Image (tube, rainbow, N blue to C red):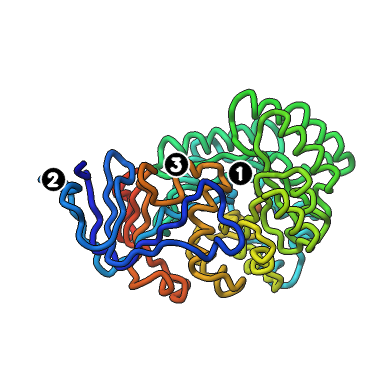
């Protein structure tokens, strides 16, 4: 069968092993890397991937042949944890942060997440769509083709719903795919400071049922952290979310080790995120339950901490890792997933192959979209990121700059030379 398009003469193509399950432990350092490769696309899907001369049957007189000598291709990158939709920014807290005021102290004083709650409540639907679209364009320019976005800057129904409807709208108006997560349990709003129980009841009895009923999100997430939601509270909220058919994620042991990873294991959540302070017991519990560890080293860097999540220890314990940006206005204000990948190597000592698996196939599993994206297997969506680089190692060694040349989404060229084309 002839292709619509064939990308040819790629120096290298990174093909994750697409086994149908997340890659765990040692599997994470395995992949097929093709040299002088081609990728054939038909009807927006991958038709064939191979090395050397393109087989004659893939090319007809109407096939577009694109020469990408000097480039590397990978499956479109997937940013599996972001707080994409939010109003405002928080550079007003930057000098406080540089002066050593801890993240949780800023939140307790009514700033931090609560300051973004005010900005998000005050922003109109259209303003949020426009602002988020700009953030997505920056992500796309950096090679991302699928993104997760959380609510959690409303902390009351109207604004939480607005954020989730914005995410739906973005899915329609932007070429990137958006996976939506409800995170009403992101902080306790100021008026419930003295009686958080009341807010938790609202989450469980009002908001979660409505998220499910109105089909507003696929996942439910929670900030399980000292001074935010305890392990016991997280258990109640996540259990209710599961009863309503939502898949579970949690921000676990980001700052303090309070048993978040253990709870992820106990509930067998889909993933647990951050885990900078996860205990050995928690890591084992997650491995046993098959929970994906989604690591966010950009946050560690931006919070100016030195205790990066123990990626190597996690892989030694046979965990599956994903890597993501955590893009948000507070703890990690960057859309650049390449920088996060470089931190995966330089700060967490992951290998380049482990890093690419963590932002492609494992990130797809983390969002439960691996049936469509995350690899270059025949029949999958032709989401492809093309980098101007001689090889994969170069992409992680040459840090802090954008090396993406082209992005294809469902087979269409949607970004070239830092310009969005949709
Ligand atoms: O993943 N920790 C909670 N949520 C985000 C930060 C959100 C914010 O500061 O606005 C995080 O770090
Ligand atoms: Fe986060």
Occupied quadrant, residue 329: bottom right
Measured Cα–Cα span from mark 2 to mark 1 = 44 Å
Q: Name the residue under label 3.
A: 372
Q: Where is residue 272 in the image (x, y as percent from the top left)?
A: 68, 51
- Judged left or right of residue 61, residue 345 is right
Q: Where is residue 162 in the image (x, y as percent from the top left)?
A: 59, 34
- Judged left or right of residue 29, residue 184 is right
**CB at disc 2 and ligand 2 closer than 8 Å:** no
SS for callout 3: loop
Q: Can residue 88 be seen in this view?
A: yes
Q: How many labels does the image show?
A: 3
Categorize mark 3 by other alpha carbons within 10 Å: few (<14), some (14-19), many (20+): some
The earlier-in-sequence mark between 2 and 1 is: 2
In what quadrant of the picture does the C terminus appear?
Answer: top left
In what quadrant of the picture does the N terminus appear?
Answer: top left
For the point 13% across and 44% down, the residue is 62
Residue 407 or 292: which is nearer the viewer?
Answer: 292
**CB at disc 1 and ligand 2 closer than 8 Å:** yes
Categorize mark 1 by other alpha carbons within 10 Å: few (<14), some (14-19), many (20+): many
The earlier-in-sequence mark between 1 and 3 is: 1
Marks 2 and 1: CB-CB under 8 Å? no
Q: Name the residue under label 2.
A: 60
SS for callout 2: loop
SS for callout 1: strand
Q: Mark 1 points at which residue?
A: 150
Marks 1 and 3: CB-CB under 8 Å? no
Measured Cα–Cα span from mark 3 to mark 2 = 27 Å
Name the outermost residue toward the top. 213
Q: Position of residue 57 (x, y in %)?
A: 17, 47
Question: In this rendering, which labeled residue sits more in front, label 2 or label 1?
Answer: 2
For the point 76% across and 54% down, the residue is 285
């Amino acid at each position: 069968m002839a292709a619509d398009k064939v990308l040819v003469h790629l120096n290298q193509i990174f093909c994750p092993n697409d086994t149908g399950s997340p890659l765990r432990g040692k599997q994470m350092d395995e992949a097929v890397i093709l040299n002088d490769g081609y990728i054939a696309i038909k009807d927006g899907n991958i038709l064939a991937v191979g090395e050397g001369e393109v087989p004659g049957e893939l090319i007809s007189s109407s096939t577009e042949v694109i020469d990408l000598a000097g480039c590397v291709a990978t499956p479109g990158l997937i940013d599996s944890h972001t707080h994409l939709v939010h109003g405002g920014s928080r550079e007003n807290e930057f000098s406080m942060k540089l002066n050593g005021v801890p993240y949780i102290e800023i939140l307790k004083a009514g700033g931090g997440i609560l300051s973004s709650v005010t900005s998000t409540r005050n922003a109109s639907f259209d303003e949020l769509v426009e602002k988020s679209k700009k953030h997505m364009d920056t992500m796309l320019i950096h090679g991302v083709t699928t993104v997760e976005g959380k609510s959690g800057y409303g902390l009351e129904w109207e604004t939480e719903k607005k954020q989730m409807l914005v995410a739906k709208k973005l899915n329609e108006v932007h070429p990137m795919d958006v996976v939506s997560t409800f995170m009403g349990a992101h902080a306790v709003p100021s008026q419930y400071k003295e009686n958080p129980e009341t807010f938790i009841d609202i989450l469980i009895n009002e908001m979660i049922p409505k998220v499910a009923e109105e089909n507003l999100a696929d996942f439910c997430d929670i900030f399980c952290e000292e001074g935010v939601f305890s392990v016991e509270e997280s258990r109640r909220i996540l259990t209710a979310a599961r009863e309503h058919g939502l898949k579970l994620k949690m921000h676990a042991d980001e700052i303090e080790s309070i048993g978040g990873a253990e709870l992820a294991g106990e509930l067998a959540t889909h993933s647990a995120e951050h885990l900078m302070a996860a205990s050995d017991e928690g890591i084992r519990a997650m491995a046993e339950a098959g929970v994906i560890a989604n690591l966010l080293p950009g946050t560690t860097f931006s919070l100016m901490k030195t205790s990066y999540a123990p990626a190597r220890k996690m892989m030694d314990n046979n965990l599956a890792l994903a890597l993501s940006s955590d893009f948000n206005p507070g703890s990690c204000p960057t859309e650049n997933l390449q920088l996060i990948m470089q931190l995966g190597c330089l700060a967490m000592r992951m290998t380049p192959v482990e890093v690419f698996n963590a932002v492609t196939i494992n990130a797809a599993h983390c969002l439960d979209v691996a049936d469509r994206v995350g690899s270059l297997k025949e029949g999958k969506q032709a989401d492809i990121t093309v980098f101007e680089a001689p090889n994969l190692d170069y992409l992680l060694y040459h840090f802090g700059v954008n090396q993406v040349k082209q992005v294809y989404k469902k087979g269409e060229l949607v970004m070239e030379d830092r310009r969005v084309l949709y």
